[in-house]
Image (tube, rainbow, N blue to C red):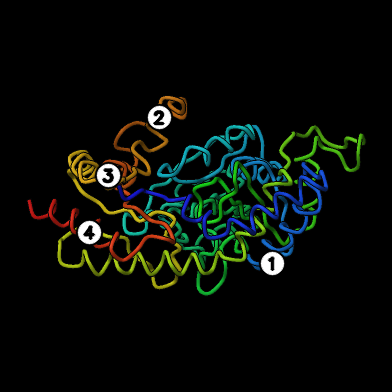
Amino acid sequence: MIPFVDLKAQYASIKDEVNTAIQHVLETCQFTLGSEVAAFEEEFSTYCSAEYGIGVNTGTSALHLALLAAGIGPGDEVITVPFTFVATVASIYYAGAKTVFVDIDPQTFTMDVKAIEGAITERTKAIIPVHLYGQPADMDPILEIAKRHNLVVIEDAAQAHGAEYKGKRVGSLGDMGCFSFYPGKNLGAYGEGGMVVTNNPEYTRTIRMLRDWGAEKKYHHVLKGYNFRLEGIQGAVLRVKLKYLEEWTEARRTAAGHYNQLLANTGILTPKEMSYARHVYHVYAIRTKSRSEWQEALNAKEVQTGIHYPIPVHLLPAYSDLGYVAGDFPHSEQASNEVLSLPMFAELTPTQREEVCEAVALLARK
């Protein structure tokens, strides 16, 4: 079986360092926040070229608290895309605001910048571009529109650790950048985790309080906050993994390039890295109109695949109250019907890549 992701292989390569880091937390008993989290906040924010990092319990909480820090709440509107993981939209709901969707660019799977202006109303307060699959959204036009309309830009970088836009790391391009450290991410914890990075000290102060019951110091609660703290063990594990992130990213990029080469003459639509981007290939998604048949056939050949995502958020029952219907965002809907994610992880061997592409190419010829 060629797995979709192989976390065991990654752990085997860093086992001694990880075990030592976890043992240190057990011995110091700094289980919630603490020195390991503080050190990771500094190291990861520096990696992102941002001044501040605030560790939280999930990527969803990172988005939620970023919205609250920006003063967004009931009566406000936030523009984002429907072709994303549901957490992007859930965070807007948690803040009490309304989601307004714009479609994606079918070539990049990220926000269609030409659609943004038409979605802005007097209630619009923020834009959340999603760097889906590890490819940055086209940020310059987004930032220009936001500046003209006095909007906050919160990057959803949950799948884009180390991705770059015109040579600059994502997360530091907008007002705030939000990351997830879910175990399967390019930089994944051994549990849940997230972070907001920013250059704004006021946002930083607010989010630090909100994640810890709204307290400025222990038992002094300035805001109505949440229990969204990052655990010490996760901070320690992530510090170990961060040292290898660039190496793992380059391995992913090599694997994606090999896939592109092997599938070049098959007629299959493969991911396109834009000229402005450093794509980090959290997901390598091809497109096919016969997805169900292909996924079943690949599984029979012991090649695991995924679908990211089978239903755009505007068509999910949970968000039917937003009032959108099928046909409103045709590019998102088509992508949801066609994308098929191939195995992608840093330890994916050349032989495994060849086996995957041989199986896929055979399906394309039928």
The reply to whether the C-beta atoms of the residues labelled 4 and 1 are less than 8 Å apart is: no
1 or 2: mark nearer the eye? 1
Spatial CA distance of label 3 from label 2 is 15 Å
Q: Amino acid at mark 2?
A: Leu
Q: Is residue 338 left or right of residue 20?
A: left
Instruction: Name which of mark 1 and mark 3 comes first in the sequence.
Output: 1
Spatial CA distance of label 4 from label 1 is 37 Å
Spatial CA distance of label 1 from label 2 is 37 Å
Which residue lies under the disc numbered 2?
316
156 lies above or below 61: below
Q: Amino acid at mark 1?
A: Thr
4 or 2: mark nearer the eye? 4
Q: Nearer the viewer, residue 225 or 161?
A: 161
Return the mark for residue 334: 3
Using a 10 Å C-alpha cutoff, classify the residue at mark 3 as few (fewer than 14 neighbours), some (14 to 19) or many (20 or more): some
Residue 181 in picture, x, y percent from top left? 58, 49
The reply to whether the C-beta atoms of the residues labelled 3 and 4 are less than 8 Å apart is: no
The reply to whether the C-beta atoms of the residues labelled 4 and 2 are less than 8 Å apart is: no
Dot 4 lies on which element? helix
Residue at the spot 69% in from the left edge and 67% down from the top edge? 46
- Residue 203 in sight from this viewpoint: no
Residue 143 in picture, x, y percent from top left? 56, 62
Return the mark for residue 46: 1
Instruction: Name which of mark 3 and mark 2 comes first in the sequence.
Output: 2
1 or 3: mark nearer the eye? 1
86 lies above or below 50: above
Which residue lies under the disc numbered 4?
357
Instruction: Name which of mark 4 and mark 1 comes first in the sequence.
Output: 1
Residue at the spot 44% in from the left edge and 55% down from the top edge? 282
